[in-house]
Amino acid sequence: MFDSKNPQRTPISELGEFGLIDRLVKNAKSKLPNTAFAMGDDAGLIDQGEYFTAITTDLLVEGVHFDLSYMPLKHLGYKSVIVNLSDVYAMNGTAEHITVGIAVSNRFPVEAIEEVYEGIHLACEHYNVDLIGGDTTASSSGLMISITATGRVRKENATMRSGAKDNDLIVVSGDVGGAYMGLQILEREKQVFIENPDMQPELGGHEYILERQLKPEARKDIIDLLHKLEVQPTSMIDVSDGLSSEILHLSKASSHQFNIYENKIPIDPSIYALCEEFNLNTTTVGLNGGEDYELLFTIGIEDHDKIKANPNLSVIGYVKEGSGANLITRDDKVVELKAQGFKHHEG
Ligand code: ADP
Ligand code: MG
């Protein structure tokens, strides 16, 4: 307990986001027999007898997760739904319902909030999800949107972060790094505008990565595809914080070593030239750029034939007994993966 007479003050930065969460929930004990899984995966699971209900929450805060100088309100509404549905799909489930909590300061007219809701409704339409409630309140500092999504998962299909096993293949959908590069373009044009408000932003030619940042999609299509191909992933997570960070989550939860090949990381061709322009390393962007909302999963080697021809899926590496995660570089060096950046092994 925080005692104001005897204050012990640990800076949050000392723990980091995941350290803070661990500390907050370390004494939580589930009491109910139908709590099938609590904390530590993309969604919690409630046992409903025949199936699981998956529940997940994500909070988006102005100035932290979005900047309204370039994020259109409708896109913001859309994205705030997507980031939640993505976590339901990461359990191999079907998203069904959402509730929306929204805090607004009085600088927003009603029409602005309506625009946010246009995006929310559109996402519900596209993903066959129903909005069933929420909460609305005033905010003294900016806009906040907290969405909770629920979904249904057949018990035998539920995919945790923890099931990867020896010799499994590591697969990622779509491509990574695009949303981050989209953000770089938006930030650059914002600076140009601040310095010279008469300048028009130069966004042409960057449609793909801008869409990745401003209008991401959740990979329901991949869940449907895996079902159709009769592929049951052994572990799965969605790529919200960056490939590297998510690989480490799977590795830790599964207590296995993850090895990925630098030359297998799927990166959109448009990103290569842009990385040069921004003086960024493409691999670093692919590993650490977040917000792509792709699915990262492992499959048994026997399922390789079922997925190998699919252009939406890239096999990027393999699982071994052990711990941690490695990047095998283009010149065959083994580099330990870190959540942010990567460091070379000595010797
Ligand atoms: P994701 O990126 O999939 O949304 P997070 O990294 O936000 O997951 O959270 C990691 C895990 O910690 C999840 O299982 C989440 O439910 C749980 N979690 C995060 N914040 C809290 C909190 N304040 N209280 C309880 N559980 C939390
Ligand atoms: Mg997630």
Image (spheres, rainbow, N blue to C red):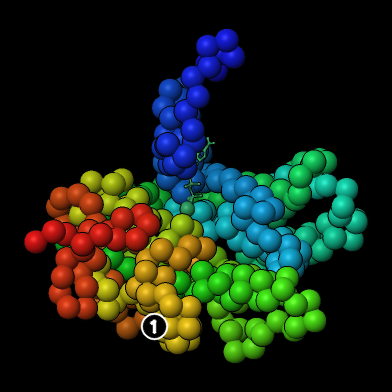
Indicate whether 88 appears above or below 294.
above
Q: Residue at x 61, y 74 (%)?
A: 188
Quickly name the residue at label 1: 311
Q: Residue furthest front?
A: 195
Q: Position of residue 309 (x, y in %)?
A: 32, 83
Q: Position of residue 224 (x, y in %)?
A: 47, 68
Q: Residue furthest bottom?
A: 205
Any part of residue 270 in sight: yes
From the viewer's perspective, tell me whether residue 34 is left or right of residue 72: left
Quadrant placement of the C terminus: bottom left
User: 199 or 273, which is in the foreground?
Assistant: 199
User: 91 or 155, which is in the foreground?
Assistant: 91
Specify the quadrant of the image occupied by residue 123: bottom right
Specify the quadrant of the image occupied by residue 113: bottom right
Q: Residue at x 57, y 10 (%)?
A: 5
From the viewer's perspective, tell me whether residue 123 is left or right of residue 182: right
Indicate whether 149 appears above or below 305.
above
Secondary structure state at the residue bearing disc 1: loop
Q: Residue furthest top?
A: 5
- Give the residue type that dot 1 points to: Pro
